[in-house]
Amino acid sequence: KGLIANAQIKARDVNTLCGDVIEITARVNNGKISEINFDGKGCAISQASASMLTELVEGKSLDEAARLQKQELLDALGIELSPMRVKCALLGFKVLKLGVYSHLGKKMTAEEEEELEE
Ligand code: FES
């Protein structure tokens, strides 16, 4: 937890329903996420999920991170969540995608954007 100084990837988002925030910073080396941290404030699920997410993608290529599916993170969390709580759990996921896509100069398809807002 904490932010990386001079990170190449920086992204932040807020859950508009509760005001909770996640910020992700990462360093990229040879196309791979060599170091990734998160910071933020909010419910235990949003913070724990962001923490697990950083562990899931550290060492992965940017393409792998861009392709990561929501379900992989939810499976890693391994608990049953109500729809409201799923939104909490996916706040960090959304931030990661925003950061990776922006770093790659890639635009999300309307479908991908919609999926992040669900
Ligand atoms: Fe705000 Fe969970 S209650 S992200």
Image (cartoon, helix red, strand yellow):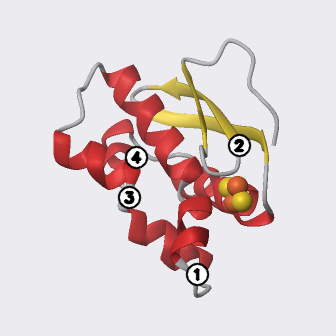
Residue at the extreme bottom of the image, as rendered: 80
Residue at mark 3: C-beta within 8 A of ligand 1: no
- Which marked residue is nearer to the observer: mark 2 or mark 1? 2
Q: Which residue is mark 2?
A: 19
Give the image quarter of residue 52: bottom right
Q: Is residue 9 above or below residue 117?
A: above
Identify residue type, mark 3. Glu
- Looking at the picture, how far across and down is residue 101, in whole percent? 35, 30
- Looking at the picture, how far across and down is residue 24, in whole percent? 63, 34
Say whether residue 51 is visible. Answer: no
Q: Is residue 94 left or right of residue 5?
A: left
Residue 118's mark? 3
Q: Which residue is mark 1?
A: 81
Q: Which residue is mark 4?
A: 65
At label 4, counting other C-alpha atoms closer than 10 Å, the crowd grade (few under 14, some 14-19, many 20 or more) is: many
Q: Is residue 90 above or below residue 95?
A: below
Distance Cα–Cα, label 1 vs label 4:
23 Å
At label 1, counting other C-alpha atoms closer than 10 Å, the crowd grade (few under 14, some 14-19, many 20 or more) is: some
Say whether residue 50 is visible. Answer: yes
